[in-house]
Amino acid sequence: MKRFIFSLLALSLAAMAYADVEGVKTQNVRLERNGDYMVVDMNLDMSELNVRSNRAVILTPAIVNGADSVNFSSVGVYGRKRYYYYVRDGRSTLTGKSEQSYRKAKKPDTLLYHSIIPYQKWMEGSQLVLNRSVYGCCNAKVGEQSTALVDDYKSPVAEKLYYKPTFVYMRPVAEGEKVREIKGSAFIDFPVNQVEIYPEYRSNTAELDKIQQTINSVRNDKDVTIRSLSIKGFASPEGTFDHNTYLAKERTAALKRYVQNLYHFDPSIISTDYEAEDWDGLRRVVESSNLENREAILEIINSSREPDRKDWKIRTTYPEQYAHLLKHVYPALRHSDYKVEYSVRSYSDVEEIKRVLAVSPQKLSLEELYLVANSYEQGSEEHNEVFEVAVRMFPEDEIANLNAANSAMEKRDMESAKRYLQRAGNSAEAVYARGIYAAMAEDYDTARTLLRKAESGGIAQATVALQEIETFIENNK
């Protein structure tokens, strides 16, 4: 029956020590089947592993049964010359991106090894072996050794059916225009009561560089068009409110002129605002502090007094705490917040989207991420990884959470699926996904209720799932 697959309950084979390969001892070897995957865990003692400068030693656990074999991820230890050749020069490692690679001088004495591969039926009665391969120049293998860690793998427990459903992924709606923003804060120092920017004054060089780097990060991208730049200046509460209003306004105007002179933007792109005294910022700092008389100071901050009266009340009632705030907190309240809003062109070619995903995922829309995910086999590591990226980029989006929940259930990661389903909305597809979750958790009454609701909402797969669940229950009595 194609919708049901067999899952072995976890088999653990463990011991304190096993046969070794040259320079490496294995301990606490543990081989398990967990659903659709085989899992191996062990300790690799590499304290006595010696690797010559122009050599690389690759340690690869593998499952072998006659002519059938499959490797787990490898551990590579590279001599100094080999390390610079393969790793530091940006070349691929000997066994690919999943390899754990170390320079000999930096290798751990003990490595907690963990790796998983898809389960296949032929693995029953197989061996778990550890292969040690030595490579020299030109990727030539110059030595090889193998030892068995587990013989004749078999489960001592009965097989148990579990339900494997069909998952329904939703295609997101395309964005009309992809608008993104990047924010920052700069702390420009001004001489007392002055409003002119001096780039070399105190830490101004670094603070002004922060603004330039933010703008350049999008301005130099050929796929991006800057829509607006907003600057908002703040002053700290000491002094009179009127004077602080002047300082915040004029210092913000000075920063606008500085940026305009650098980039010569259309004047309509840059907008400014100011806030005479950053009482909200002061409130946040005091709330998170262990300042003596914290609650009383917060009461003054939150009161309806005029700003000058608030500052006077704190200064005269709690002089020690005020001195602390003046020295350690108020300087950070004199800041300029800036935001660059920009639009990103659309992408339709899947291979181009993959390249953008690798370096700038924030430039992609949910629909573009969906196109990439769909280019991979459903349930594959790559397929699931793209939906994980999508939900990280759009954590509040209902479709992103629904698709991430489905990919988590594909991996039987039920905790993550439960979390994503809480933010997946109430579409018929989301109701269906919650019904599938209930079925996989063996809560069949809830599953039936939800799947019937999804069925009435037009989800054809719900009808099939209801039939499969009844057959599954009957066959698993």
Image: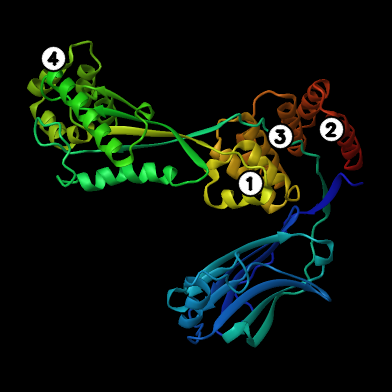
Q: Which mark is residue 461?
A: 2
In this rendering, the label closer to the viewer, 4 or 3? 3
Name the residue carrying label 1.
386
Confirm whether residue 114 shows in the render. yes
Q: Which mark is residue 103?
A: none
In this rendering, the label closer to the viewer, 1 or 2? 1
Extreme residue toward the bottom, this view: 142
Badge 3: residue crowd in 10 Å (few <14, some 14–19, many ≥20): some
Residue 246: quadrant of the picture: top left
* Front-lying residue, 404 or 107: 404
Q: Name which of mark 3 and mark 2 comes first in the sequence.
A: 3
Q: Name which of mark 3 and mark 1 comes first in the sequence.
A: 3
Name the residue carrying label 4.
309
**Which secondary structure lies at badge 1?**
helix
**Which secondary structure lies at badge 2?**
helix
Name the residue carrying label 3.
171
Q: Is residue 431 above or below residue 389?
A: above
Q: Name which of mark 1 and mark 2 comes first in the sequence.
A: 1
Q: Name which of mark 4 and mark 3 comes first in the sequence.
A: 3
Dot 3 and dot 2 residues touching (CB under 8 Å): no
* Front-lying residue, 379 or 474: 379
* Front-lying residue, 395 or 117: 395
Confirm whether residue 414 shows in the render. no
